[in-house]
Amino acid sequence: MTTKNSMQAAALLRLREPEVRVLCSGSAFIRGDAWQRAGHVGNPTMYTDGLSADVRGTWRQVARVTVRADAKGIHTNCTCGAGEYCRHAAALLLHWVRAPRSFSDLAPEVYGDAPSLEQVLSLAADPPDEEPERSQFGSLLETHTMTELREIARRRGLRGGGRNKIELAATLAVSLADPENVDAALATLTDGERTLLQLIDLLDVDAQVGTIVAPAHHLLSGGSDLTEMYQAIATLVNLGLVFNIGDWRYQSERYTVPRVVAVRIPMAGSPLAQLVRRAERADQTDLHSDRSGLDLMEVFLVVGHEVLRGSIGRELPSAPAGTTIVPSSGWMTEPATGSGTKAQLGRSRGTELTLRPQSPVLSEADLRSLAERTGESSDLIDFAATMLLAMDVLSITGQAKSAHLVPQQQPLHALLQFPPTDRTITLVEAWLSLFEAFDFRSVRIEGKPLELHTLQVPYHAPLAMGAPQSGAVRDLMAKLIMRLAAVETEPRWYDLPAWLDMLWTLTPELLGTGKGPAGEWWFSHPSGRETRFNLQERAGWQEVWAPLIESMLLGPLTWLHLVDTSRQEDGTLSFRPRPEAAMVFAPPSGEVEPRSLPPLILQVDPSSGAPEILVPAGYPDLSLHSMLAETTDLADVSPAGLRYRFTRQRAQEAFDQGGTAPDLLAILTERIGGSVPEEVRAVLDAWWTSYGKVRLYDDLTLIELDDDILLQVLLATSSLRSALVEVITPRLVAIDPAATRPLVGELERLGYTPRVVEDA
């Protein structure tokens, strides 16, 4: 390797996780971190001047990422088109930091150096369309050496072949992911090893094997020797059932269990199941009332439509002056009132800061407006907007005061078309990938938000020792509920107080104690900041955990249809797993039996003369929403449901795509379970009859756009809609000539550079 290449490689060798946080924005780091931990980084390869990998991201699409190091720093390139330091690049960089031994060297060509990254990109073929479970297994196997892979194959009774580590890992992934082979490996484990495997999957946290997993393992298995536990971990690793994805250079421990293994770990009759059963209610609990409001997907449609219209998301709330957001955690810091520098033995010990979760992406006015219109809570609207950002349905463009939301309708329509199981899995994965502090947005104590404080040690970033691991609590709750739903033929009810007793017994230190060499953090009582909650004592621990778990149960776990909840007469919250939770854990072999469909209301609006259809709230067939979203306008939303309006323009767009009025009428007839009202049929027939006739206009201004998406963006962010005369194609529109100059000026203020061509 030349001296220049050595210098370039040194930039990558010196790379640490804090530097990745700086290179990649907060949201990019969060998603990249989640993908890397889930084993989504495949084919990691090292070249003379950089790295490459295939990263599986949103919608299970795989992007090819390359990283190049030169004298000016580290640069990334990704096929996703999001620019440098995207989420896929963050996943690759984190994989390099945490598992550098998994990268294979690209063999140099005969009499020459290894090809450049540009050459690799030009030669790279589209990544194979693998099953997600097998792809994850293959990515995790690549973290091992050839010797370790052969040892795994020997212990599992397999004969692995391959010319290099990548080929051997891919071959083994097929056999090791086979359910029968997984069951055979599980059958060789002792009770203690099987319990440890279950705990490692549930307690997915960084470098906490000794302080979190070990006490839980001792509780459930009776093992008291820490050495024995590490010997059991070695057995699980050597069998390919557990993988260490921590940073070996810092002796960091973070173990993960492949999904295909996790779903085969028996829950029924296990020590964990016996512990959880203690939280079961002895008496029968009735579901007081199921949610009769809008479904989460319907709220997605409303939020996306309102952003498209420009009625919300045009002005995003900005962080108050002097505040900063801690990367990846989502905690926003600001100097605490009356606090200052703490001294210890005459030296500065640190500055006390107050932290709170970063503000919702929508303003309070936008949240309140949608909450009033939909009859839902602001927390649900905030959750929907945050999830849409996480799934790339919404994105933020512009900076500072000009920042605004831009919708991408195609991903949302694709999600509507997913089978129920795939859709639920996608939504749960997106929720589990959200930033840590999100869970605390809805936590209230005595009606006030919970406050987090930190003592910032000089020369260290805020929360340098790590934030409260609420994401691990979120993961534990979801996985436990999924497993219970999968093994219980008759869903059982669980009391929140008894459930908290179980969690305290199992893992009291999951959130952390808040103390470390790089600083400390603590929660305070709303009525007095000087009163700290002692997380090492049950009373202080419950002050934080009880509202945190309750907000998850009443919020995301309910909105995602993973639990039912009920309030007892004494106010006690109870919950039970829903069948959808079992679908996420172990998807059924056949499709879920469809629910009965409520009646639709189809009529002509007297004021506009346009046909309208009211889809009741909670309508189970989301493909109908997808069809209507593509062919109609969302006219109104209320607790009763979503009201769509057919317009001549949208009908023409549908006809341009090959649809016909008879086809549309046939779909409506099938959906409403009867004949279409005659007045509705007459309007649609008239539009179809007039379709294709020549329309002559005098004195128009034409606007030609560069792509198909820009029109929707301009309709949402400018006054184009009010000036519009006709949408000829997605890239060509006609407007009123009187509005030309004002619109051009507005577009220039928004950052566009329209070129005006005067026709003589």
Image (tube, rainbow, N blue to C red):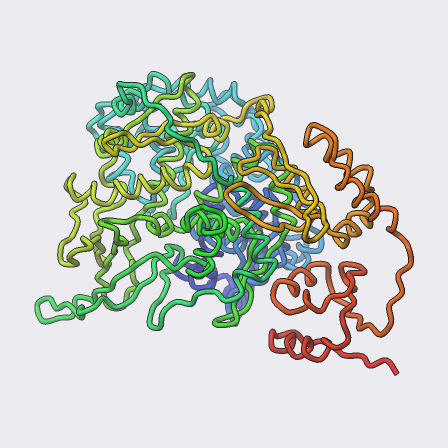
Q: Which residue is drawn at the image coordinates 30% and 48% (left, top)?
A: 443
Q: Quadrant of residue 115?
A: bottom right
- How many callouts does the rendering have? 0
- Seen in the picture, residue 461 relative to 488 is either above or below; the reply is below
In the image, residue 152 lies at what x, y percent? Answer: 47, 28
In the image, residue 316 lies at what x, y percent? Answer: 48, 65
Taking the image as shown, residue 128 lies to the left or right of residue 679, namely: left
Given residues 33 and 682, the one toward you in this image is 682
Q: Quadrant of residue 752?
A: bottom right
Taking the image as shown, residue 61 lies to the left or right of residue 151, namely: right
**As drawn, which residue projects farthest toward the left?**
345
Taking the image as shown, residue 138 lies to the left or right of residue 241, namely: right
Does residue 382 appear in this view? Answer: yes
Given residues 303 and 457, the one toward you in this image is 303
In the image, residue 372 lies at what x, y percent? Answer: 46, 52
**As drawn, which residue projects farthest toward the bottom?**
760
- Seen in the picture, residue 6 relative to 514 is either above or below; the reply is below
- Quadrant into which the N terminus falls: bottom right
Q: Which residue is drawn at the image coordinates 49% and 52% (left, top)?
A: 385
In the image, residue 527 lies at what x, y percent? Answer: 17, 55
Given residues 638 and 362, the one toward you in this image is 638
Given residues 244 and 442, the one toward you in this image is 442
**As drawn, which residue projects farthest toward the front?**
606
Q: Which residue is drawn at the image coordinates 22% and 38% (left, top)?
A: 508
- Quadrant into which the C terminus falls: bottom right
